[in-house]
Amino acid sequence: MKQNVFIALLLLASFMITSGCAQQPANKEQGFAQIQETYNQRALASLGKQYRELQQIPGHFQGGEWDPRVDEWMGEKHRIMQALHYQLKQKYSTVPEIRKLLGEPNWEVTKGHLFFNELNTDCKDDQVTQYDVFFWRGQVDFLYFGADGLNVLCLGWWHAGE
């Protein structure tokens, strides 16, 4: 019995390696980086508009059908949010400016909320009193902005890491 399990695992590992499941070719990773760079160069207002439009699509992680535009790793919504993160981290903004750009947050996490301390371990800023959370794939993966009520002091990604 143990021998059969070992052989099955060996065959599975062999299949994964030869089919590319267990490895990421360098040229594919380089392709992702080149594509992302084109997103990073888009105008901030355009990215915000595209994000708001894609937020209206309830993907798999928000109770809808799987939609590669909003659910897939490196799908359209993911790339747009990465570009937003890239541009906004260059120059922090204010909460009203972020909300004008992205719309109302999916969550507003304030001190006392159970999740506040989790997010605050990344920002490590005693002045942060709230986090505005904008979903990529529902509560699984999202972009967050830590603020003192007005000024954005930090931003980052929360990934479930599945």
Image: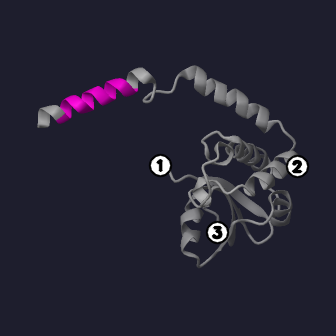
- Give the residue type that dot 3 points to: Asp
Answer left or right for 50 relative to 7. Answer: right
Region in magenta = 5-16
Q: Are marks 3 and 1 in contact (CB under 8 Å)?
A: no
Q: CA distance from mark 3 to mark 2?
A: 30 Å
| Residue in the foreground of this view, choosing between 46 and 67 | 67
* Distance from Cα at disc 3 to Cα at disc 1: 30 Å
Asked if residue 70 is positioned above or below residue 10 in the image, the reply reads below
Q: 10 Å neighbourhood of mark 1: few (<14), some, or many (≥20)? A: few
Q: Amino acid at mark 1?
A: Glu
Disc 3: which residue: 126
Q: Give residue 45's mark.
A: 2
- Marked residue nearer the N-terminal end (3 or 1): 3
Image coordinates of residue 159 in percent, x first then y, are 56, 52
Q: Earlier in the sequence, mark 1 or mark 2?
A: 2
Up-down: is 46 above or below 7? below
Residue underneath mark 1: 162
For label 2, the SS is helix
Q: Mark 3 or mark 2: name the one nearer the start of the chain.
A: 2
Q: Residue, x 85% and y 66% (percent of image)?
A: 96
